[in-house]
Image: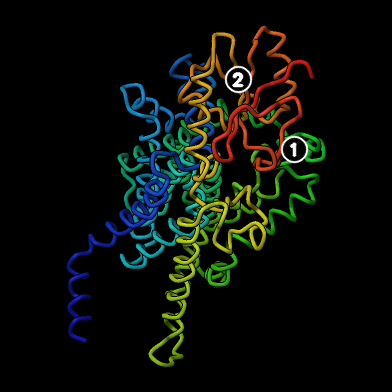
Amino acid sequence: MANVRSMKDWITQNRYIFPLLAFVIPLVVRAIPEILMGPYIVGFDTMGFYVPNTLLWLHNGVNLGDFLAAAPLFYTIFMSIVAVGGSPVLVLKIIPPLLLGFLGLSMYAYAKRGLGWSPSKSAFVALLGSIYFVALRASWDQLREELGLVFFFVVLMLLINPKEKSWKRYAVLSFAMIAVALSHQLALVLMFGVIVFTAAYQLFHKEFISSIKLILVSLPATLYFFIVYLSGVLQSGFLNYSTNVGSPLATWTGFTSYQSMLISTGGLFLYCFVLILPLAMISIWQLRNLQLGSWLLLSLILILVPIAVSPYRWVLMLTYPLAFYATDTLSRLKSIKWKRYKLTAHRIAILYLVLSTAILSLGYIFMAPEQPFLYFNSEHFNSYAYQIPTSMLQNTISITDCQDTVNALQWFKNNENSSSLLLTHTVFYSWALLTRNECQVRNYGFDAPDTVAMVAAQEGYSQIYLIWWVNGQGWYGQPTLPSSFNEVYHSGKIAIYSYNMSL
């Protein structure tokens, strides 16, 4: 008992330990898959989009309007480091753990200073909201979104603390809003929703000056949203899922109807949150917090709206408010007097959350995609492998195929000539750009490769190659290639094919 008391005294005297844990533990956890992947990048979007976009923009330049529409803050940081000589691969292995660490710290700051929670309770929600497996999935490749959430929690902290109403506070609030706008579109939409609910609440309670000030400091971010982002959304319009049938991309990712989207998204919601939802539901009706309630309500509404953003992104966004509600429930369980074998309802709930989160998250981190942890196995529980990949140990391809991909691209390098062209699916495009000149690589996206190969042959290329898995082993709904492609080299499950122009 003396040791326990001395430990409590030490913690009380060293309160800095809690924000430190909120930063360090998520950072370390997110660094584990980076270490296990060795020299290879973690994350689909990380490898499939951040790498090629950065390399092409640095080499060819980029239209300012397109760059601004891409939520450019993360790209600006990344491109600046690469432009001065940083390795894009190394940078993209260092930034994700740091981002998750800062996200944990920002959640801690919001809970501590915004909600007035104790340091230990604030640290708990920071850890739950950053290393729960859904949060790890988001950190797997949604780096711009994470950056936006870091600033979003700063905005929430400033919104919920009305005591300090100096111009400095509003200036910081305005800059934080702009940072959200420059970081990610989804975080910006959520931020606007929270601001609208907050301003309406202030007007309802006749806090006219506070409401006007809030609207004024929101104007820069609002203008950016309407000028840069909203036009693109309006051009995309509402999705008609039935028109996507037959598209190679829709075969892998799409829905055949709005009803199928609702059923699938509802199933995904339960798959992601069934473990914490019972605890979160208790506080949803009792924790009177305008900002968290607005976040939850707006995300649920946006899941139902068939706009150009996939609904699964809004499902993942629910991780953070639900983590706050589940954590708040733990405090409420302290009032239950039941006790058995020194176990109270409060302690049992904490043990349940810690063990369930640790087991799923560690299984998600350490198991390979081909032999995933049971809960993430697509043959058992995980019917949402597109939204929740079976393991973190992959990017556009599995960790087991990374070295073989490097070997295949080296073979192409050794056998190419001035009239050679390598065709790549989106998942191999960035791999090729890291080793070959962009003029020798053509990305056919999710289209039919034989159609693109035919066009390339008409353009005068005498040797047309393609990189893909060996027949029968292909990912993304394409286990085999058309018969016009003949395998000429393979390393493990990755092969180089030659296009037969006579077929």
- How far apart are the two marked residues, 1 and 2, measured between alpha carbons? 29 Å
Residue at x-position 75% and y-position 30%: 482
Query: 165 or 179: nearer the eye?
Result: 179
Disc on res. 239: 1
Residue at the farthest bottom position = 340
Question: Is the residue marked by circle 2 packed among few (<14), some (14-19), or many (20+) residues within 10 Å?
Answer: many
With 59 as the anchor, is 492 left or right in this view? right
**Disc count in the image?**
2
With 127 as the anchor, is 298 left or right in this view? right
Q: Look at the image and name its color scheme.
A: rainbow
In this rendering, the label closer to the viewer, 1 or 2 = 2
Residue at x-position 54% and y-position 11%: 417
* Disc with the residue nearer the chain's start (1 vs 2): 1
The image shows residue 53 at horizontal and vertical percentages of 50, 25
Q: Is residue 223 visible?
A: no
The amino acid on which the numbered mark 2 sits, given as a three-letter code, is Arg
Q: Quadrant of residue 478?
A: top right
Residue at the farthest top position = 460
Label 1 secondary element:
loop
Disc on res. 442: 2
The amino acid on which the numbered mark 1 sits, given as a three-letter code, is Leu
User: Which quadrant, please, contains the C terminus?
Assistant: top right
Rendered position, 166 above or below 76:
below
The image shows residue 420 at horizontal and vertical percentages of 59, 14
The image shows residue 431 at horizontal and vertical percentages of 50, 30
